[in-house]
């Protein structure tokens, strides 16, 4: 089906932060499969582990205990300070499960039509429920009516949330991305996240933080909300958790961990031996190679260098992000830069029509970051100086 606007490139193989197409042309991958390829491409330790696992057991269903699933759950609990994990196969599924948890939590409190607070510019997925939670009317068009039960507020404005608390008695949860990815790489303020945590506690709401894109070390901490020194009640994960192997997870704290009972939710492929082995190895390798520190240091240097090189350039509205999650907002749509960057040997994306996004593998070095900047900045300057744009 014609659901993707693809570039005329077919990739054949990769190594580290580089990929090659079928014409043997090399690209620096600053997109990382959209924040998925945590360890880059063909990481030797991950490849060896997955080969071993494929030769042992790929799938068996959740009728049985799965050793790697239990090991991965234990590690996610340790890293998050939470208590329980449900595994699925994607970020959309993880966010859908979070919405179900919030609704069942509300019904248990006697609220017949529970509502969830969501945010402007948010993106949580493309199923009907997650699309309804998403703050993008453009991608909602043609799929109405949207699912009811969502109250939308702007980011980083605590007074707007306090008004909801006073006026909306059916609210049961607040759901946000610690850094909005598809919405344009908009970080939530650390003080704001702390205030939301306090407001959720005061009103007996669940705090649900979507870490699908900004989690798994991308910002320099395991989860982006940890910069605010808070712990959510529900945390969906996916993307970078399997370093390319499809996997999703919902991590829950004590208030939400027992909301689901047997039969309330499930996933045929969720938590299968291959996917959870990928998760176990990804987290192990990240710790062994110090990739959180690398993401913080290289990402911080990259952000600073971009700001220096694009300082004063007319048409550059903002440069923002955290760690290796960076957005360069222009004052006009710039989707054509994706092809231009590829022509120059750099893979990026443009999100929210005018934000150049880079979410490279967490193994990126400063030298490679400089290489990406050297390709990208001249393209942006030329684009902004072209009258037709």
Image (tube, rainbow, N blue to C red):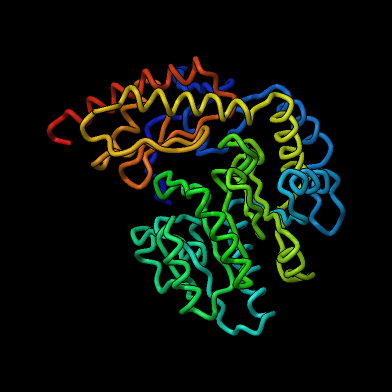
For residue 160, which quarter of the picture? bottom left
Identify which residue, 358 or 296, lies in the foreground: 296
Which percent across, then down, holds residue 22? 47, 23
Identify which residue, 200 or 281, lies in the foreground: 200
Disc tally is 0
- Kindly identify the residue that appears in the image at 41 percent across and 46 percent down: 4
Which residue is farthest left? 387
Which percent across, then down, holds residue 62? 80, 57
> In this picture, is 371 found above or below 236?
above
Which residue is farthest top? 367
Which percent across, then down, holds residue 13? 56, 24
- Kindly identify the residue that appears in the image at 73 percent across and 43 percent down: 79
Q: Is residue 56 left or right of residue 8?
A: right
Quarter of the picture containing the C terminus is top left
Q: In this view, does 131 lie to the left or right of 253?
A: left
- Kindly identify the residue that appears in the image at 22 percent across and 35 percent down: 315
For residue 356, which quarter of the picture? top left
Which percent across, then down, holds residue 258? 77, 67
């Amino acid at each position: 089906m014609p659901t993707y606007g693809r570039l005329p490139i077919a990739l054949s193989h990769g190594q580290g932060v580089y990929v090659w197409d079928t014409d043997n042309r090399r690209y620096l991958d600053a997109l990382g499969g959209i924040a998925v390829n945590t360890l880059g491409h063909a990481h030797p330790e991950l490849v060896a582990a997955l080969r071993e696992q494929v030769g042992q057991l790929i799938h068996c269903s959740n009728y049985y205990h799965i050793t790697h699933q239990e090991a991965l759950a234990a590690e996610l609990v340790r890293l998050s300070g939470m208590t329980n994990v449900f595994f699925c196969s994607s970020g959309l599924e993880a966010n859908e499960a979070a919405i179900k948890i919030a609704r069942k939590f509300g019904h248990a409190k006697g609220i017949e039509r529970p509502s969830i607070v969501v945010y402007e510019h948010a993106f949580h997925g493309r199923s009907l429920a997650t699309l309804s939670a998403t703050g993008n009317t453009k991608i909602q068009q043609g799929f109405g009516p949207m699912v009811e039960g969502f109250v939308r507020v702007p980011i980083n404005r605590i007074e707007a949330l306090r008004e909801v608390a006073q006026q909306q008695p059916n609210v049961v949860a607040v759901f946000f991305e610690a850094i909005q990815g598809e919405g344009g790489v908009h970080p939530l303020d650390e003080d704001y996240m702390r205030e939301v945590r306090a407001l959720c506690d005061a009103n007996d709401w669940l705090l649900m933080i979507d870490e699908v894109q900004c989690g798994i070390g991308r910002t320099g901490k395991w989860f982006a909300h940890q910069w605010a020194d808070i712990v959510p009640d529900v945390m969906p994960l996916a993307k970078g958790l399997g370093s390319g192997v499809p996997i999703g997870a919902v991590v829950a704290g004590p208030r939400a961990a027992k909301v689901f009972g047997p039969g309330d939710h499930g996933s045929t492929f969720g938590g299968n031996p291959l996917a959870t082995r990928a998760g176990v190895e990804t987290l192990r390798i990240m710790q062994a190679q110090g990739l959180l520190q690398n993401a913080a240091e290289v990402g911080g240097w990259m952000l600073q260098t971009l700001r220096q090189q694009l300082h004063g350039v007319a048409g550059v509205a903002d440069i923002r992000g955290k760690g290796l999650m960076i957005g360069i907002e222009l004052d006009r749509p710039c989707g054509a830069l994706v092809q231009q960057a590829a022509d120059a040997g750099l893979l990026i994306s443009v999100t929210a029509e005018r934000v150049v996004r880079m979410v490279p593998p967490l193994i990126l070095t400063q030298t490679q970051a400089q290489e990406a900047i050297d390709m990208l900045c001249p393209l942006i300057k030329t684009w902004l100086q072209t009258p037709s744009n």
